[in-house]
Amino acid sequence: MRSFVLNENEMNEILSHHASPFFVVSTAKVAENYEFLRKHLPHADVYYAMKANPAPAILETVAGLGSNFDVASAGEIEMLAALGLDGSRMIYANPVKDERGLEAARAYGVKRMTFDDASEIGKIAAYVPDADVLVRVAVHNRRAHVDLNTKFGARPEDAIPLLLEAKAAGLNPVGICFHVGSQSLSTGPMKRRCSSFTDFSMRRKLPASTSPTSTSAAASPCRTRTASPSTSRP
């Protein structure tokens, strides 16, 4: 995926027609990046993380191509709903959900969610009692620009107990997810985590399918239900 870059002459041409500052988006580049992911992850569904860039032109472009969306707040859910997107095409992937976000999820039919702590289970059950939930497991990655696993993610050994607790609360546990960190410079952490999940599932006789929901553009070697979204560089 090549970056979209304007040269100085092109920038000056735009400045002659528009006030500064301005924001330029190449929807053609967005579409090219999306199709790149679809080609190389043919068995995965792509979820675009809105926090990467919520420009309406980008959202409309990837939505038109069939993308799903990774949302982290009520505002993001409501923005997609205003564009006509159904809640079934969203995953509420904020590990710490607030009341307004859960209310929006209930209102717009967002049933798929992630969590990494038992304290989230009761909150989710109270607002979306039939939610499909994935437990988020920590993946430490020193080669990521931002290693979010210093803040989020359950210990691997806690994943199954958390899923069982969610099931006991009436939720529908559907899998395990992870976030390798933003701007990761290596696929190693994802490969290692996928391998550990496969080994673990074989020992526990659990399905091997995992569902990484990351904001970095990375391809999972696992059999996946969802894949990390890719953003263009406008």
Image (cartoon, helix red, strand yellow):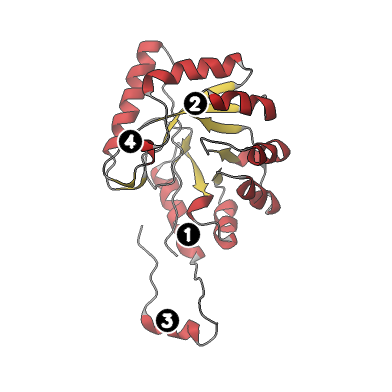
* Residue nearest the viewer, comparing 112 with 29: 112
Kindly report the distance in space between the C-alpha atoms of the residues bearing marks 2 and 1. 35 Å
Q: Earlier in the sequence, mark 3 or mark 4?
A: 3
Q: Secondary structure at mark 4?
A: helix
- In this view, 64 is above or below 139: below
- In this view, 29 is above or below 68: below
Q: Is residue 59 visible?
A: yes
Residue wearing tag 3: 10
Left/right placement of residue 101 relative to residue 189 reads right
Residue wearing tag 1: 30
Q: Earlier in the sequence, mark 3 or mark 2?
A: 3
Residue wearing tag 4: 190
Find residue 110 and report its image quarter: top right
* Residue nearest the viewer, comparing 85 with 37: 85
Q: Amino acid at mark 1?
A: Val
Find residue 154 and report its image quarter: top left
Kindly report the distance in space between the C-alpha atoms of the residues bearing marks 4 and 1. 24 Å
Circles 4 and 1, Cβ within 8 Å, touching? The answer is no
Q: Residue 8 location, x and y as percent? A: 37, 81
Name the residue at 59% across, 52% down. 63
